[in-house]
Image (tube, rainbow, N blue to C red):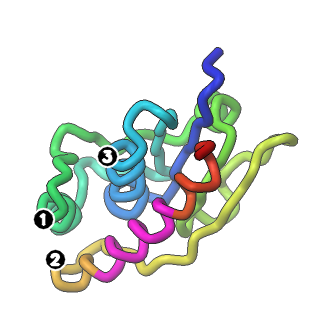
Amino acid sequence: MSDKPSVLFVCVHNAGRSQMAAGYLSHLAGDAIEVRSAGSAPADTINPSVVEAMREEGIDITDQKPKILTTDAVQASDVVITMGCGDVCPVFPGKRYLDWQLDDPAGQGVDAVRPIRDEIRTRIEKLITELTPG
């Protein structure tokens, strides 16, 4: 069992918002925070506009694949951040739950994804300061 905080990002397809959030948290927090992402109905691949928008930030998420949300992933996480997954996320006592209302980048071009990406970065930076001492 690790003593570092762990965060799970959940959206429906695990192909956009949750992948950007996980990419930013891994990139900005390094090994200080465990990062997971999953979807209630995962897509086959990550949204190419999301991949491009993150590439502009110097973050390569091309090796990531959408994953199904599991009870184990929720239980193993200290903070669960939902992004439009509705009521499908299992709730366990002792977990911190946040619901980030963000536009869905599905079917959008990179110009529409950039503002979503930038909002996610702002929220990730705040989250890092909350979860890491100093």
Residue sitting at x 42%, y 44%: 29
Mark 3, residue position:
27
Magenta highlight range: 115-125
Q: Quadrant of residue 16?
A: bottom left
Q: Are marks 1 and 3 in contact (CB under 8 Å)?
A: no
Q: Label 3 neighbourhood size at 10 Å, few (<14), some (14-19), many (20+)?
A: few
Percent x, y of residue 45: 23, 49
Q: Are marks 2 and 1 in contact (CB under 8 Å)?
A: yes
Percent x, y of residue 114: 25, 78
Numbered mark located on residue 56 in the image = 1
Identify the main secondary structure in magenta: helix
Q: Mark 3 or mark 1, which is nearer the start of the sequence?
A: 3
Q: Against 80, is 103 above or below?
A: below
Left or right, 101 with reference to 125: right
- The quadrant the N terminus occupies is top right
Percent x, y of residue 82: 59, 60
Nearer to the camera, 82 or 57: 57
Membership of 117 in magenta stretch: yes
Circle 1 SS class: loop
Q: Nearer the viewer, mark 2 or mark 3?
A: 3
Q: Quadrant of residue 62?
A: top left
Numbered mark located on residue 116 in the image = none
Mark 2, residue position:
110
Nearer to the camera, 108 or 120: 120
Residue sitting at x 31%, y 82%: 115
